[in-house]
Amino acid sequence: PLHAGFVGKGMLDAAISGNVFSSPSPDRIGSAIEQVSCGKGVLMVIKNYSGDIMNFGLSADLAEMDDIEVAQVIVKDDVAVPDREEGTGRRGIAGTVFVHKIAGAKAEEKAAAEKKAAAEKAVRNIRTMGVAMTPCILPAVGKPGFQIADDEIEIGMGIHGEQGVETTKIKSAKEIAEILVGRILDDYDYSGSEVAVLVNG
């Protein structure tokens, strides 16, 4: 449901939701592509999960058979997961919001040719890491995928309740920020750069 809140002027033209923790179906995605297409191409912003990549990719192929030009960017900003060539690799999480804003601003400027390039540049420069104080209850299972004690936190937990990189005792906000920002800065050198910081939650 996150992305529906970013549909509007200068942002997304549509957001397609699947069932909880599931990719939307290709027919839902295809319907959205058809509805937002205005002859200038459609850019899909996809978080890096196997089901999303498969279903959005299939929908793009079907749309192109109907002469709708479709491009895509895949967000993979979570530094809790190693960035690798094989497998799905790094997850897409909260940094996706920045990609929405940047691509949406370019589209609003009528810079259709530039919106994909701007979104891809954003993806290359965005790094994110999360922390959780409780595990996630998987709706289809009815129980958490793992346990966190009342006096513990999970560093790097994923948005679908995936276990993180470390379970540790509760720390102060300052200590947690140092851990998360430290992991981000270890992964990407922002020295001398102007940055925007998103604190989610």
Image: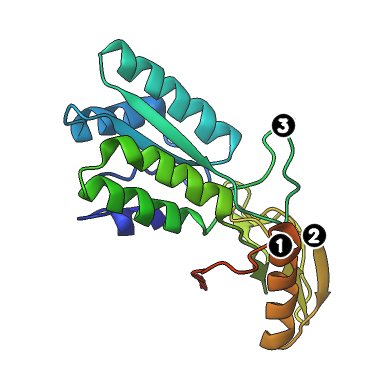
Tell me the amino acid under the disc marked 1: Gly
Rendered position, 145 above or below 176: above
Q: Is residue 120 positioned above or below 139 on the image?
A: above
Q: Secondary structure at mark 3?
A: loop
Could one spot residue 18 in this view of the protein? no
User: Which of the image's four quarters has the N terminus?
Assistant: bottom left
Residue for point 74% across, 30% down: 86
Colouring style: rainbow
User: In this rendering, is residue 6 above or below 60?
Assistant: below
Mark 2 burial class by Cα count in 10 Å: few <14, some 14-19, many 20+: some
Q: Secondary structure at mark 1?
A: loop
In this picture, residue 197 sits left or right of residue 146: left
Residue 193 vs residue 107, the one in the foreground: 193
Tell me the SS state at disc 2.
Answer: loop
92 relative to 101 in the view: left or right: right
Task: Say which quarter of the image contains residue 147.
Answer: bottom right
Residue identified by numbered label 1: 156
